[in-house]
Amino acid sequence: MSNFTYKARDKRGSLIKGSMEAKDKEVVSAALIADNLTPVRIEEQQEESRRSIDIDLSQLLAKKHIPLDDMVLFCRQMHALTRSGIPIMRAVLGLAETSKNPLLCDVLKEVGRVLGRGTTLSNALKAHEDAFSPLFISMVHVGESTGQLDEAFEQLVAHLEMERDTKKKVKSAFRYPLMVIGSIMVAMVVVNVFVIPSFANVFEKFGSDLPLASKLLLASSNFFVNFWYLLLLIGFMSVFGFVKWTKTEEGALKWDEYKLKLPLIGDLLRRISLSRFTRTFAMLFRSGVPILSALDISAEAIGNLYIEESVKQMRLGIEKGDSLARTANASGMFTPLILQMIAVGEESGALDKLLTDVSDFYDEETEYEVKGLSAAIEPIMLVFMGAMILVLALGIFLPLWDLGAAR
């Protein structure tokens, strides 16, 4: 007998965690299904000694994820195969053989084996929540229930492509400032290790007090050369501590809240998160997913825990009988435009269409702001680099000018 930890969802879609002693995973899965729970993930507990060694590293190492490009290709292929009437198990196993991504290949082979036992595709995907998001699984489940699985994959293609394009835009916006910051750091190392020490011997021969800028440069260079290992240790421990803190529930929540307050990019990140929520919720609502389940799944697709928690709190108000517009207004997370669209959508019965329009509007604004982000950051970088060059020039050349004046 072994101990297993499990995650399951009840009929209302709430996530339930627990542990159970059983012979194997199949026994745990059968017990959960008998209790009207849908298994999401079942894992065998590791031995305490082994777990104590690996726990910190496992928390810090990033999980392997399937790239969005591969997921888009998989959904396109599944859309074509299911539309052609090819059996699901045959389609999945065929794609597993042709997939160039080893992780996706292994996952699809396992999904194909589970399908061979007579289960549905959505239930087979639930055992691989690291590879397939709750949104992905829910859309597949809706497609199976309505007999429109090909349309479900078509909608997933559009969603994943939009997600991929958004990430590319954000990366392109941050590429320039990161390159500038990296160049500045390299320049500081070169100046402190090679340039300033070469002038130090010259400064010592002056025999007079050096300007303040020169003293600061010499002190900085001496500290850098003599205690470089200490700087590396401090930097490593700072990164290690920060990553470990953001892996905790409280740390991740605080960090996501702080990111929304950052200058220049805070509003951009908030707009991207709201666009994800409105688009995802509209797609689920249009597909017939219950509103409470749609809220939970859309919240997990936001990508920001602070906004996610606020959205999940909305279901409490809806369970009490409040309207979606009233609970959204009480959360304080949504812009007046979204609140107005939700209110009008509930009254007119076109909630999914109006929220899709809001998402399109925010996507256009995001694209415009991403293009202007580099232009907004560039003056700040230039001022910072100019200040560094000024201090360096004053520290090196002022003593030389004083020497020339003395002669």
Image: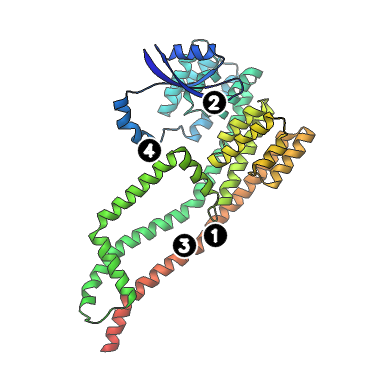
Q: What amino acid does circle 1 point to? A: Ala
Q: Are marks 2 and 3 in contact (CB under 8 Å)?
A: no
Secondary structure beneath dot 4 equals helix
Q: What amino acid does circle 3 point to? A: Met
Number of the front mark, 4 or 2: 2
Q: Earlier in the sequence, mark 4 or mark 2?
A: 2
Screen quadrant of the N terminus: top left
Q: Nearer the viewer, residue 320 or 173?
A: 320
Q: What amino acid does circle 2 point to? A: Leu
Which residue is denoted by mark 4 in the rendering?
Answer: 60
Res 179 visible: yes
Q: Earlier in the sequence, mark 1 or mark 4?
A: 4
Which residue is denoted by mark 3 in the rendering?
Answer: 381
* Rendered location of residue 342, percent (x, y): 72, 38
Which residue is denoted by mark 2 in the rendering?
Answer: 15
Residue positioned most to the front: 320
Q: Earlier in the sequence, mark 3 or mark 1?
A: 1
Marks 3 and 4, how far apart at CA: 31 Å
Res 304 visible: no
For label 4, the crowd category at 10 Å Cα-Cα, with few meaning under 14, some 14 to 19 and many 20 or more, is some
